[in-house]
Image (spheres, helix red, strand yellow):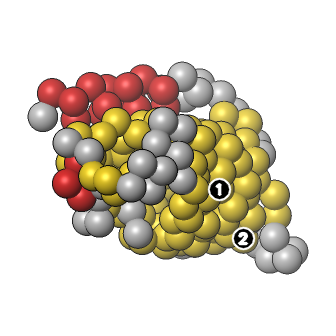
Amino acid sequence: MKTFYRIFFALALVLSVGFSANAQSGYQTGIGFRGGVASGLTVKHFIKSDAAIEGILSTSFRHRGTVITVLYEKHAPAFNARGLQWYYGIGGHVGFHEGRHYYDHGHKHYHDNVVALGVDGVLGLEYYIRDIPFTIGADIKPYINIPSGGGFWDSALHVRYVF
C-alpha cells in the first residue's frame, strides 16, 4: 500500500507543475475515468493553449497491478467541428504487478513481482460538451516495457469533468 501512496504523490507533484500556465480555449483541467484494457483515473491539465499533461493511474485485471502514466500531449482542432480535438503525445510509465499474472515473453516465464518501466505514445480524439462541462473521448496508447521488453497496445474510452 505504501507503493500506491508514493505513486499517487508522484502523480500529484508532476501534474501540479503546470497549474499556473495558460488555459486551453475550452477548459483548463479535467478529471475523470478511463475504461479499457487498463482502466482507472485520468487527469489532464493544459499547460499551453495547444499542449497538455495527462496523468493516468490505472489497473489491469490481466496483470493484477497498478500503473502510473504521464503523457505530454499536443492538441489540434478536428474536422472543423466546435469542441472536437485530436491529440497525440509521448510519455512514460511505471507499473507494479503481481508476478504470477505477468508473463515475460522475452524469458518465457512468470516473475514473482514485476516493476515495469516504459515509454508510451498516445493518439486520440476528444469532444468537449460545454453545456454539462464534460469531455468524452477515445484513444489508442501503444507502449513498450523497457526491462522486460514487449510492445503492447491499450485502447480506451474516457469521460472527464472539466473546469
Whether pointer 1 and pointer 2 mark residues with C-beta atoms closer than 8 Å, the reply is no
Residue at 54% of width from left, 53% of height from top?
150
Apparent side of residue 20 relative to residue 76 in the rendered image (left or right): left
Q: Residue at x 39, y 55 (%)?
A: 108
Q: Position of residue 33 (x, y in %)?
A: 38, 62
75 up-or-down from 118: above or below = below
Residue 57 seen? no
Give the residue pinned by disc 2: 84
Residue under label 1: 122
Secondary structure of the residue carrying numbered label 2: strand
The one nearer the camera, 137 or 46, is 137
In this view, the residue in front, 50 or 155, is 155
Residue 10 seen in render: yes
* Image x and y of residue 97, in percent: 27, 46
Residue drawn at the location 51% of the way across and 65% of the way down? 154
Q: Position of residue 122 (x, y in %)?
A: 65, 56
Tag count:
2
Task: Classify 10 as above or below 75.
Answer: above
